[in-house]
Image: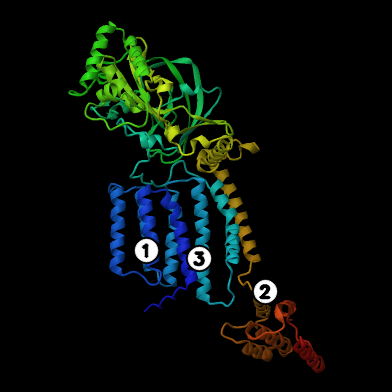
Amino acid sequence: MSKPSMPLDSSCRHWTLIASAACLLPLLLQLPAQLGGLIGVTAVVVGLLAWRQPLPGWLRLVLTLALVGTVLGVGGFSFGRDTGCALLAAMLAVKPSETAGLRDARSMIGFALFAPFATFLLDQGPLSLLMGLVATVLALTALQTLADLEVGDRLVRTTGRRLLGIGRLLAIGLPLALSVFWLFPRLGTPLWGVPERSLARPGLSDRMTPGEWVDVMTDDTPALRVRFFGPAPDTSQMYWRGPVLWNFDGRSWTQPQWLRGLPPAISEPSPVRWDYELEIEPTDRRQLVALDLPMSAPEDMRLSLDHGLYASKPVSSLTRIRLRSAEPRQYEAKIGRVLRGMALALPDGYNPRTLALARQWRREAGGDDEAIVRRALAWVQRDFAYTLETPLLGRHSVDEFLFDYKAGFCEHFSSAFVVLMRGAGIPARVVTGYTGGYRNSIGNYWLVRRSDAHAWAEVWLPDRGWVRVDPTAAVAPERIYDTLADRAPGGDLLGGGMTSLLNTGDWLRRGWNDLVVGFNASRQAELLRPLGIDRLEGSHLSLLFALTASLALLWMLWLSAQGQREADPVLRAWHVLDRRYRRLGLGREPHETASDWIRRVGLARPDLALALEILSNRFVDWRYADGQTGGRAADADRQRSLTRALRTHRPTSERPRTDPQAATKQRSTGERR
């Protein structure tokens, strides 16, 4: 039978739950809000219910099955990184229900330490790292508290001393950890694949339904950062091209998948070109964005027929690419029959009023496509308004928008405009992406947020090809009623001080991305370029890593030798005394009492017995005697005197002559001390 686990006292139980909660928190913040909140509430309730005794087995089983079913249901019963991390969080939330003794507490803390490391599968930001470090320190402190309970030493460590000890351990291992991060040879691709997310991150997709973008447009998190090499285009010309949508079923626009495999259409770029670097946040999608219109694709990426930029694998980590773009003079000046038919296709039985108006404009324009485009934009400017307060549209969504409500945002304008153009016989398509950007004056780069999501139109005109038309931008300024800025909490308070704070925060995040998250194999090879070494070969990198790792290990050994396991100076000196006698073959055995040890030393070396007996009596008196008098100052003096006596005692290997009178005098002197 196994030995029963030692029961926990209240202090150890507090530390165990605090450390586990600190480990769980960063992981919960990366899960969907409702799922993370449910798991967090479950953890709190289980911790309170199981405070005095573990929950019944049947209740633990019900909680576990309910949480697992909820996690799998939210993930669509498909396994991915987020699903696995959510299951880990759910199991950790239920774990306190079976924690009763010391062994259970150690198991719970060890299990909880997986949570902050799993967080990095979902986010590699500095906040996740900081929370993970705090959780690790608290977990190590809790383990040290459990060790003190198990040992039962009378020397009780304060929380400050425990944290000081944990800090010393971290300082010992930090140089080795840094050398491994910076210098351990990195592979261009990982040895094993990490599953994708089962739930895609919010953002652009290959589907757009007018009215469903409000959540995306209120997401103020960064989508990408841009650094221009040379002049930057005007903000009004910053259209970041994403998915191009061709197919319309009467309600939603979608992207034909087969167009991705075709080579990009021929375009004639204008002389004004822009050279820039994109830093794209993870999206777990292959679709990227680029300044309209990208001239070529970087390595391991490709351009589709409609100049959509695609990566070879989902963008699950921070990605940097360098691109060149230019506005086209001509873009696919000749369009094939199949593509023209796709760009004119409309579903039967939808939006009859819009189609009737489009056919009327076609008759009145006399074949002038540009006149129809200008007429539509003038109508938008005169009669339409921009607002996020839009009702849910019915079957004839375009008719309702154009003739009834006449108010909406970019999804409504672009969708209705393309349907109107197609009804008039002009090939048109919807383009989604981002528009504009915010220039961070501290880092001299542009920040594009997910709230900058936008949709516009492209129409095909003879001799010019595809031409960008943004009907949303045609709305008269006095008809813009409800915008994202109006809905932003405290938006009117963003004065100079707050703006500077936000700029500084994002600049620090960009520096973190550059220094840590974006540190890959190619950056590692160029690590010593500031020292005049252009590129480190694999053999040189391995040699440099071996050298720095060896130095770090020597540092660890030196600090470990300097530190003492025993915190009490008297006990440290007593152990040193034992080691000195051990060199003479007279060390104290683990089973021996101090009296037995002195008796054995006296038989082997009578010349050493007297001094050792005096020191032993003083040590036993200090260690185990009760009711010391004289106050704290006197006790401190006795401790220092005993420590000094133990440290200065040096047993010799020679056997000197013993003078009985001197021995008697030495005994009386020791007793007076």
Q: Quadrant of the N terminus?
A: bottom left
Q: Which mark is residue 46?
A: 1
Residue 276 vs residue 452, the one in the foreground: 452
Judge left or right: residue 503 versus residue 477: right
Kind of residue indicated by mark 1: Val
Residue 194 vs residue 117, the one in the foreground: 117
Disc 2 marks which residue?
569
The first of marks 1 and 3 along the sequence is: 1
Q: Residues within 10 Å of mark 1 (few under 14, many from 20)?
A: many
Question: Which of pointers 3 and 2 indicates the residue nearer the eye?
Answer: 3
Q: Which mark is residue 142?
A: 3
Q: Is residue 2 visible?
A: yes
Q: Is residue 434 above or below residue 356?
A: below
Q: Is residue 88 visible?
A: no
Q: Residues within 10 Å of mark 3 (few under 14, many from 20)?
A: many
Residue at the left extreme? 349
